[in-house]
């Protein structure tokens, strides 16, 4: 990473962290190396190392599990809700379409732990959009609910591999595969109609009304009711719904959401509700993708000037400029360096002028 990109990313990182702090999310720092845990949701995708004692360690592949572990160890009794923010690098051995082609990337995110109300879910979506807005980006939220689909399947008495396969084919929006699977497993005509309808439940607030007309069991009805409450608090007209979205259904127990920005096909932000001992929900922003979509709104870098003495450097910095101190009295060397760096002005004391004039010759 070269200096200009480093500066952009650092600017965005600071703005995002400041926005999280303004909403009451306190920062935590988490280890990059963890003991391998076969139950970890990203275990098969994590880079593994073996230490001198023969223990297998895994490079951090996501933050939520570590934040949950910290919350359970250090704040088992709260106070709840517990609002935490984090940031740092992640590593994944496998590539997939969600994460682009990066094996090492940076995420900034928050977790809201210990509560599972509709207000908490709506807060996270408000924070997500306001964070993007704080760096000049207008995001569009797309909301799904793997818990809703899972509740339909649970209400139908399905479990095990069949339930898993139905989640996958619906998330792929594959109608032919869904019909073939239903026929092969001998599932009811009524369930087939319900799942085919769920497959098409994409769009604005009318999606919720259409879902409400389905014949739903107790669990599915409760899941839909929760989503309706969240949407009502947030403003359903501000959301796109995709009730056929079932990505990572084994991890997310409730609603999920992701943010897109016009002109970019890849999501910038994603998260949702899960249950990992303590109820929790959160989201993470990909810093690399945020840098791409926020490039147009990044502030210009301050001008760099060549300071010929310390008072000059202090004078320039007090005016918002970046001052590099001269390291020699040789005007030719300083002039050559200024040309290479593209530095046009120099400062001595409180005199700020063209480099060549202050050096006493052509720069």
Image (cartoon, rainbow, N blue to C red):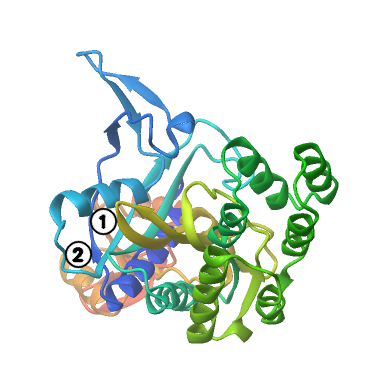
Q: Nearer the viewer, residue 72 or 160?
A: 160
The location of residue 47, given as percent across then percent down, is: 42, 28
Q: Callout 2: few (<14), some (14-19), or many (20+) C-alpha neighbours within 10 Å? A: some
Give the image quarter of residue 94. top right
Q: How many marks?
A: 2
- Residue 67: x and y in percent read 28, 52
Locate residue 286 relative to residue 57 in the image: left or right: right
Residue neighbourhood size for the residue with mark 1, other residues' Cα within 10 Å, grouped as few (<14), some (14–19), many (≥20): some
Furthest residue toward right: 176
| Real-space Cα separation, disc 2 to disc 1, in angstroms | 7 Å
Image vertical order of residue 80 relative to residue 280, above or below = below
Visible in this render: residue 363? Answer: no
Q: Secondary structure at mark 2?
A: loop
Counting from the top left corner in percent of width and height, residue 340 is at 47, 51
Q: Nearer the viewer, residue 143 or 338?
A: 143
Label 2–label 1 contact, CB within 8 A: yes
Query: Who's the residue at 35% across and 74% down the image?
Result: 19
Residue bearing mark 1: 326
- Look at the image and tell me whether residue 236 can be seen: yes
Image quadrant where residue 266 sits: bottom right
Residue at 47% across, 48% down:
251
Q: Position of residue 65 (x, y in %)?
A: 34, 46
Q: Which mark is residue 309?
A: 2
Could you tell which of marks 2 and 1 lies nearer the N-terminus? 2
Horizontal side of 134 relative to 99 (left or right) equals left
The answer to which of 167 and 97 lies nearer the viewer is 167
Q: Secondary structure at mark 1?
A: loop
Query: What residue do we see at 22% from left, 76% from top?
Result: 315
Which quadrant of the figure contains the C terminus?
Answer: bottom left
Q: Which mark is residue 150?
A: none
**Relative height, residue 184 to residue 321 (above, below):** above
- Comparing 185 with 76, the one in front is 185
């Amino acid at each position: 990473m070269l200096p200009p990109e480093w500066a952009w990313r650092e600017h965005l990182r600071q703005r995002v962290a400041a926005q999280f702090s303004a909403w009451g999310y306190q920062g935590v720092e988490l280890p990059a190396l963890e003991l391998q845990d076969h139950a970890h949701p990203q275990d098969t995708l994590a880079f593994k190392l073996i230490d001198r004692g023969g223990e297998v360690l895994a490079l951090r592949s996501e933050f939520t599990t570590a934040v949950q572990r910290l919350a359970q160890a250090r704040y088992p009794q709260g106070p709840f809700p517990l609002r935490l923010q984090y940031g740092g690098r992640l590593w994944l051995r496998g590539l997939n379409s969600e994460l682009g082609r990066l094996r090492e990337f940076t995420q900034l995110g928050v977790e809201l732990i210990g509560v599972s109300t509709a207000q908490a879910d709506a807060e996270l979506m408000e924070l997500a959009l306001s964070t993007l807005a704080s760096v000049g980006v207008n995001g569009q939220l797309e909301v799904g609910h793997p818990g809703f689909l899972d509740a339909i399947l649970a209400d139908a008495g399905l479990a095990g591999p069949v339930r898993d396969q139905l989640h996958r084919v619906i998330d792929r929006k594959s109608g032919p595969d869904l019909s073939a699977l239903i026929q092969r497993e001998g599932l009811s005509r009524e369930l087939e109609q319900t799942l085919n309808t769920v497959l098409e439940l994409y769009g604005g607030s009318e999606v919720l009304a259409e879902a409400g007309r389905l014949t739903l069991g107790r669990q599915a009805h409760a899941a839909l009711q929760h989503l309706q409450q969240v949407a009502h608090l947030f403003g359903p007209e501000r959301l796109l719904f995709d009730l056929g979205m079932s990505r990572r259904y084994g991890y997310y127990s409730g609603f999920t959401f992701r943010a897109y920005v016009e002109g970019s096909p890849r999501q910038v932000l994603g998260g949702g509700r899960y249950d990992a001992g303590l109820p929790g929900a959160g989201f993470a922003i990909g810093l690399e993708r945020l840098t791409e979509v926020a490039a147009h709104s990044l502030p210009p870098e301050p001008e760099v000037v060549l300071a010929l003495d310390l008072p000059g450097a202090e004078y320039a910095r007090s005016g918002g400029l970046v001052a590099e101190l001269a390291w020699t009295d040789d005007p030719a060397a300083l002039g050559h360096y200024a040309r290479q760096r593209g530095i046009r002005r120099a400062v001595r004391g409180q005199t700020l002028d063209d480099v060549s004039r202050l050096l006493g010759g052509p720069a």
